[in-house]
Image (cartoon, rainbow, N blue to C red):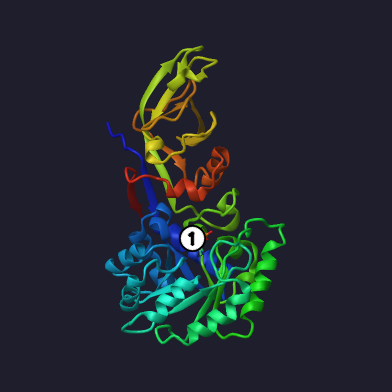
């Protein structure tokens, strides 16, 4: 007997393939590989080591994430995508070759008033229409001049912005944001970066000097279309196994609340994965898993540690057989669509209980 609990199998071959695809799409841009949130649930140390030679910089959201890269031997530059949170963090950035976004006056003042061993590379964040982070278009010159006059700031200042609707292929808002970004930076020297995954796939003009791929590096599309359409291969295969196979009578319910009742004699399989592993609880009956070369529907409510599938009366499936929840055989984008969330949420919500296995 050999039953495996929920396991995320991670492929470095797929990761490298996706970076090649990204390079083909944006051949003239340098790459900030976005590895925030534990590399979107894929394991930050493994991912960063696997891709370090192919990329130019790493992007993270928290200082702790940057320091974990450094303590694991990553030497390429690292960029804090939302900037630093405390004035006391600045010396840590300076000595660890960590670059920062500056998006508000508080960060600028902290840079001006600190005493640092060496200057820090800064990217000025411009709000071109997302209206989340960034300085107003009207303040760009003022901030840029102030940064240039700050000895703690490396004179080679970059510019960043972020699209709010790059995944909407027919929206004209992305072109508007791009134009604002180009205009605001036209008379300035620094390198520019605005494209994340959506920009990289759908808006070629937005590639500029640096691209910031996140989700597509992991072989997942930024919209609910299977990533193979864009020559991307899923890096993660989320698997578990059957821990029970039992005959089930027509008319009998399955699981909590008895919400699903079989309309035929069948066999019910129990898969060792549930919302306690991060599999979404809110999926409709019929959402597929992949088992022994075919799709099989989930029936009944997803429990914390298990879910149930309708194997069919003639099934030959056995306890221990591998079940794929998403991966190459079953696009995560489909599961995201069915569960009413985005793939980003599915992968980042996997819990520490899920085992990680690095294949190839
Ligand atoms: C997360 C993030 C990215 C990567 O986004 P994807 O859609 O996953 O490619 C790029 N830039 C910034 C500022 C981010 O916060």
Task: Tell me residue 161's x, y (percent).
Answer: 57, 69
Q: How many marks?
A: 1
Up-down relation of residue 153 to residue 135 (above or below): below
- Reading the image, the residue beneath label 1 is 217
Quadrant where the image shows the C terminus: bottom left
Up-down relation of residue 41 to residue 302 (above or below): below
The residue shown at (39%, 54%) is: 42
Q: Tag 1: Cα neighbours inside 10 Å, few (<14), some, or many (≥20)?
A: many
Q: Is mark 1 within 8 Å of ligand 1?
A: yes
The residue shown at (59%, 60%) is: 198
Answer with left or right where residue 154 lies relative to residue 330.
left
Up-down relation of residue 69 to residue 353 (above or below): below
Element type at mark 1:
helix
Answer with left or right where residue 117 lies relative to residue 36.
left
Up-down relation of residue 146 to residue 273 (above or below): below
Task: Tell me residue 276's x, y (percent).
Answer: 37, 37
């Amino acid at each position: 007997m050999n039953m495996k609990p929920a396991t995320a199998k991670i492929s470095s071959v797929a990761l490298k393939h996706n970076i090649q695809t990204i390079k083909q799409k944006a051949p003239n841009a340098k790459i900030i590989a976005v590895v925030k949130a534990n590399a979107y649930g894929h394991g930050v140390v493994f991912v960063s080591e696997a891709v370090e030679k192919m990329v130019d910089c790493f992007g993270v959201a928290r200082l702790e994430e940057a320091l974990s890269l450094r303590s694991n031997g990553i030497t390429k530059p690292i960029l804090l995508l939302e900037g630093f949170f405390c004035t006391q963090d600045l010396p840590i950035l300076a000595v660890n070759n960590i670059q920062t976004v500056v998006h508000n006056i508080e960060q600028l003042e902290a840079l001006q008033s600190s005493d640092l061993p060496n200057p820090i590379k800064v990217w000025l964040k411009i709000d071109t229409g997302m209206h989340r982070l960034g300085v107003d278009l009207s303040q760009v010159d003022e901030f840029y001049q102030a940064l240039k006059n700050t000895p703690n700031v490396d004179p080679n200042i970059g510019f960043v912005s972020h699209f709010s609707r790059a995944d909407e292929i027919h929206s004209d808002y992305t072109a508007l944001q791009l134009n604002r970004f180009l205009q605001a930076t036209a008379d300035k020297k620094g390198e520019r970066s605005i494209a994340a995954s959506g920009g990289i796939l759908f808006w070629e003009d937005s590639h500029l000097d640096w691209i910031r791929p996140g989700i597509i590096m992991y072989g997942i599309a930024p919209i609910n279309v299977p990533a193979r359409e864009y020559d991307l291969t899923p890096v993660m295969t989320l698997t578990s196994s059957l821990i029970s196979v039992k005959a089930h009578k027509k008319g009998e319910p399955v699981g909590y609340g008895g919400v699903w009742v079989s309309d035929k004699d069948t066999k019910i399989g129990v898969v060792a994965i549930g919302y306690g592993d991060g599999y979404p609880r809110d999926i409709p009956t019929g959402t597929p898993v992949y088992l022994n070369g075919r799709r099989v529907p989930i029936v009944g409510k997803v429990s914390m540690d298990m879910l149930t599938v309708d194997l069919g009366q003639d099934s030959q499936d056995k306890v221990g057989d591998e079940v794929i929840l998403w991966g190459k055989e079953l696009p995560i984008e489909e599961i995201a669509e069915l569960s009413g969330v985005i793939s980003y949420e599915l992968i980042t919500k996997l819990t520490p209980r899920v085992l990680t296995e690095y294949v190839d």
